[in-house]
Image (spheres, rainbow, N blue to C red):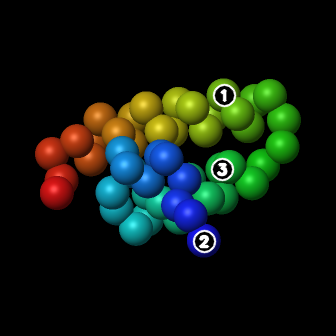
Amino acid sequence: MEQPTAHRWIKTECGRAKYAELAARPGTMARLRLTWFVLIAALRDWRLP
């Protein structure tokens, strides 16, 4: 199974689990929250290998 592109930016296991949870939710507000989460998570995980 291929990983989502966001896994390139979200590097922690808990962040990836939260991404999967948020990505499964339907609706416009859910998409907005998912985008916000990816942005913040990518900034926090930037320095991780």
Q: Residue at x 29, y 35 (%)?
A: 43
Q: What is the distance, in whole Å, between disc 1 and disc 2 at their CAs? A: 26 Å
Q: What kind of residue is marked 2?
A: Met
- Residue 10: in sight, yes or no? yes
Give the total number of marks visible in the rendering. Answer: 3
**What kind of residue is marked 1?**
Leu
N-term-proximal mark, 3 vs 1: 3
Q: Earlier in the sequence, mark 3 or mark 2?
A: 2
Label 2 environment density (alpha carbons within 10 Å; few <14, some 14–19, many ≥20): few
Q: Secondary structure at mark 2?
A: loop
Single out the mark in the foreground, 1 or 2: 2
Which quarter of the image is occupied by the C terminus? bottom left
Of residues 38 and 3, the one drawn nearer to the viewer in this rendering: 3
Residue matched to label 2: 1
The residue at 80%/28% (across/down) is 28
- Residue 32 vs 14, above or below: the answer is above
Residue 38 appears at what percent x and percent y? 48, 39
The kind of secondary structure element at disc 3 is: helix
What residue would you read off at disc 3?
22
Picture residue at 18% right of the left edge, 53% below the top: 48
Q: Position of residue 35 (x, y in %)?
A: 57, 32
Q: Is residue 33 left or right of residue 17?
A: right
Asked if residue 18 can be seen in this view, the reply is no
The residue labelled by disc 1 is: 32
Between the C-alphas of marks 3 and 1, the distance is 10 Å
Q: Earlier in the sequence, mark 1 or mark 2?
A: 2
